Amino acid sequence: CHSGPTGGHYGASYTAKKVFDLGFYWTFIYKDAFELVKHCDSCQRQGKVSQRDEMPQNFIQICEIFGVWGIDFMGPFPSSKACHLPLEIEHKAYWALKHTNFDLKTAGDHRKLQLNELNEIHDQAYKNSLIYKEQTKKLHDDKIKNRIFNVGDQVLLFNSRLKIFSGKLKSRWSGPFTISEIYPYGTAKLIHPDGCNFKVNCHRLKHYHGGDLPPLEIPDVTTFPKDK
């Protein structure tokens, strides 16, 4: 319906109203108008992705202390021509004392209290981070659309790279593709009839409801039996 110079249509309700204005009516006119607009291929390939199309947030895995180790390797260090090594001389007043100037038991108890307090601060910070993430997830998920993708659904893929090409009305949606597998954290695997398989974030997907519907078959008035 978009191929001709005067082609195009309005929304479902206004399209049904235009049919009424022309003097036509049937029982499921609003339902048929909604299906017509919903399955229009040209209309489905318009628009962009927004923040409402994002997927629900997920908590990031938190590692325990010393759960991950990182080691930096430095070198090799080139030697100087004269093979001299730099030395650092500090004042003797800054050297460590040979004997402690306080009681060992008192120092040990104080150090133990500091370590216990550090663990309490760590546990409290961990609980606060969980509460913050739960609140952030709730605020984020309340603003997005409730979209559910299943295996076998046909979807369109938003290609943001097409913005470098000229053409104001050029569609950035490619496809349709078929979902072959759903992964956690909002990722899906798409397959194309030509055999191309790849993974994308569901933020760039939207459901595809098929192409244009076939024209309605309206029987001719001469085929109805005449009243006797």
Image: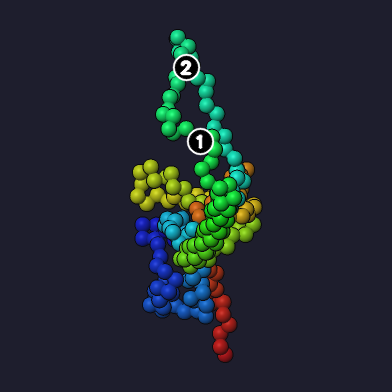
Residue 91 lies in quadrant: top left
Residue 155 percent across, percent down from the top left: 55, 55
Q: Which residue is mark 1?
A: 97
Expressed as whole percent of the image width and height from the top left, the position of residue 8 reads: 40, 62
Query: From the viewer's perspective, is residue 175 above or below residue 148?
Result: above
Using the image, tell me which numbered label, if any, was put on residue 85: 2
Q: Residue at x 54, y 32 (%)?
A: 72
Q: Is residue 206 above or below residue 28?
A: above
Q: Amino acid at mark 1?
A: Leu
Work out whether residue 87 or residue 36 is closer to the camera in this orientation and state it. 87
The amino acid sitting under disc 2 is Leu
Q: Considering the numbered disc 1 on the image, is that residue within a helix, a strand or a loop?
A: loop
Q: Position of residue 227 (x, y in %)?
A: 56, 88
Placement of 66 over or under 38, stated as above or below: above
Q: Are marks 2 and 1 in contact (CB under 8 Å)?
A: no
How many residues crowd mark 2 within 10 Å: few (<14), some (14–19), many (20+)? few
- Counting residues from the start of the chain, the first of labels 2 and 1 encountered is 2
Residue positioned 44% across, 19% down in the render? 86
Q: Quadrant of residue 21?
A: bottom left
Q: Which mark is residue 62?
A: none
- How far is the residue under mark 2 from the one under mark 1? 27 Å
Q: Position of residue 9 (x, y in %)?
A: 40, 65
Q: In the rendered view of the protein, which quadrant contains the C terminus?
A: bottom right
Q: Secondary structure at mark 2?
A: loop
